[in-house]
Image (cartoon, rainbow, N blue to C red):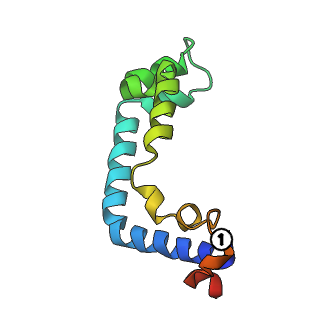
Amino acid sequence: MNLYKSRKQFEQILEYVSGYNELFHYNVTELLGSFIQDGFLKDLFNKNPSQPVDKGQLLIRKFGEAANPKNFTLQAQYYMMFGDMGEIAIDDSVTDDGIYESSEDGLDEDEIH
């Protein structure tokens, strides 16, 4: 990725964060608060538990079947089929990689600078 594309991507991220920072902060605060209140983080990161903890089962209990490793292959297949359904459109490195361009097409505007 060239410097111009990197800077452009950073500016897009900064614009998004500045526009949604209050919502992001609220969501993170709520999620972390719930993880602390129900003891999830303590159970997950406890170094000396009195009883052995199966972290896979702990994640499945908290997040449901989405966290079940048995579903990983199916989830990966769907992701490969449908992608991330939207976020990829703002990634210039994916949408404008130049792989399919011929010399007849010329340079894109961002490649001139």
x then y, percent, for residue 15: 42, 74
x then y, percent, for residue 74: 47, 26
75, 56: nearer the viewer: 75
Q: Quadrant of residue 34?
A: top left
**Element type where label 1 sits in the image:** loop
Residue type marked 1: Ser
61, 10: nearer the viewer: 10
Image position of 58 with respect to 18: above or below: above
State which quarter of the image contains the C terminus: bottom right
x then y, percent, for residue 103: 68, 76
Image position of 15 with respect to 73: above or below: below
Image position of 91 with respect to 11: above or below: above
Q: Residue at x 40, y 44 (%)?
A: 32
Q: Residue at x 65, y 62 (%)?
A: 99
State which quarter of the image contains the N terminus: bottom right
- Residue 37 appears anywhere in the view: yes
x then y, percent, for residue 92: 54, 67
75, 44: nearer the viewer: 75
Q: Is residue 38 left or right of residue 44?
A: left
Crowding near the residue tagged with mark 1, few <14, some 14–19, many ≥20 C-alpha atoms within 10 Å: few
- Residue 62 appears anywhere in the view: no
Q: Residue at x 46, y 39 (%)?
A: 81
Residue of label 1? 102
In the orientation shown, which residue stands out farthest toward the bottom?
113
Q: How many marks?
A: 1
In the orientation shown, which residue stands out farthest toward the front?
104
Q: Residue at x 50, y 76 (%)?
A: 11
